[in-house]
Image (cartoon, rainbow, N blue to C red):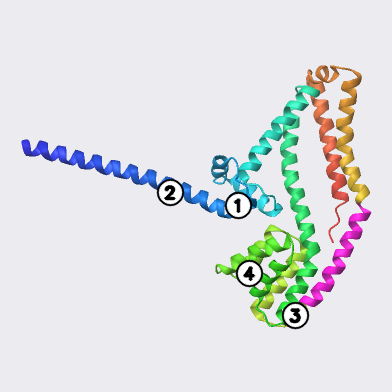
């Protein structure tokens, strides 16, 4: 009987020790994993630019979600010095700010509407920054093609030519090519590295350049002649895009003037008749009319932007 009791006590103690060791190993592993994520983030993005990042906890949790990954991909294409966590917190602060301002200046009904517009504006801001970066990158493509042609004519490998172009070109082309060079340095193929570049900054010009480089690396051929012909074509497309943008500038201003006129009309009505917006949005008919008006102004903005968008 005593042996059974001693055996039971021993098994219990052994189980307790194993549980404690398991909990200790689990907590240590989680702490090491968090430290590794912080260290890698500091090496890549968190400490880039010489400043400490904010909202690390939010950023770490957000990156595990689909929304965080989508924000991270968009931020990578814009070149902004922000983490997904920072952008998310700033976006929520901005949405809350416009909500309170609209509710106090106009009426309580316009608070949620302004919040939704703030969310749309945050996404539109990222798209605008991405478009600016793509436009600037496209303008650098003729010089990039010229550098690659000269480097390959001098006998350098395509990988070396890309690394050399990354050193010589300014941002954003220099930064994007540096990413491509880093991917190639860790063993990625030219197809994958250049394909990721085309996905980050989609444009017809870049797709043509990437296709030329990929086909030349696969099958060989006169890559120098192809790149020189491509340089001339890119220069001509660059001038064409500039002319089209200049001619459509007035239409673009008109598209942005449409929603400004709508907001200005609301402010004018509220200034001439204080409390009119509260009385109007206090009834269902008034709320419906406001929603229809916002939809019409939005439709006008979208239609004008669509009509003024010409793909070259």
Give the label on residue 224, or none: 3
Tell which circle, 2 or 1, labels the residue nearer the N-terminal end.
Answer: 2
Residue assigned mark 2:
32
Residue 133 is a magenta residue: no
Give the label on residue 45, or none: 1
Tell which circle, 4 or 3, labels the residue nearer the N-terminal end.
Answer: 4
Residue 229 is a magenta residue: yes
Tell which circle, 4 or 2, labels the residue nearer the N-terminal end.
Answer: 2
Query: Residue 253, how many percent across, how many down?
Result: 90, 45
Tell which circle, 2 or 3, labels the residue nearer the N-terminal end.
Answer: 2
The structure residue drawn at horizontal position 92% and vertical position 20%, both measured from the top left corner, is 272
Left of 1 or right of it: where is 72? right
The structure residue drawn at horizontal position 68% and vertical position 58%, both measured from the top left corner, is 200
Q: Quadrant of the N terminus?
A: top left
Residues rendered magenta in the picture: 227-248
Depicted 248 relative to depicted 292: above or below: below
């Amino acid at each position: 009987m005593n042996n059974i009791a001693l055996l039971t006590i021993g098994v219990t103690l052994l189980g307790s020790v194993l549980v404690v060791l398991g909990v200790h190993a689990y907590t240590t592993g989680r702490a090491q994993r968090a430290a590794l994520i912080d260290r890698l983030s500091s090496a890549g993005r968190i400490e880039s630019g010489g400043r400490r990042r904010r909202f690390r906890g939010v950023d770490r949790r957000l990156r595990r979600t689909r929304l965080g990954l989508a924000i991270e991909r968009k931020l990578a294409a814009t070149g902004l010095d922000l983490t997904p966590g920072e952008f998310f917190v700033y976006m929520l602060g901005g949405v809350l700010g416009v909500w309170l301002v609209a509710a106090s200046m106009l009426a309580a009904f316009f608070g949620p509407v302004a919040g939704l517009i703030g969310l749309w504006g945050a996404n539109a801001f990222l798209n605008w920054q991405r478009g600016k970066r793509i436009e600037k990158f496209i303008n650098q493509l003729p010089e990039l093609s010229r550098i690659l042609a000269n480097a390959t004519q001098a006998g350098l490998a395509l990988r070396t030519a890309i690394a050399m172009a990354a050193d010589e070109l300014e941002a954003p082309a220099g930064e994007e090519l540096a990413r491509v060079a880093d991917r190639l340095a860790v063993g990625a193929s030219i197809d994958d590295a250049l394909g990721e570049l085309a996905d980050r900054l989609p444009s017809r010009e870049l797709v043509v350049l990437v296709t030329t480089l990929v086909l030349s690396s696969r099958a060989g051929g006169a890559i120098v002649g192809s790149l020189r012909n491509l340089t001339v074509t890119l220069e001509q497309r660059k001038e064409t895009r500039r002319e089209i943008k200049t001619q459509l500038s007035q239409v673009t201003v008109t598209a942005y003037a449409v929603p400004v006129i709508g907001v200005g009309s609301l402010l004018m009505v509220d200034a001439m008749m204080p409390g009119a917006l509260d009385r109007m949005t206090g009834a269902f008919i008034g709320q419906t009319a406001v929603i229809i008006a916002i939809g019409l102004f939005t439709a006008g903005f979208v239609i004008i932007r669509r009509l003024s968008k010409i793909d070259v």
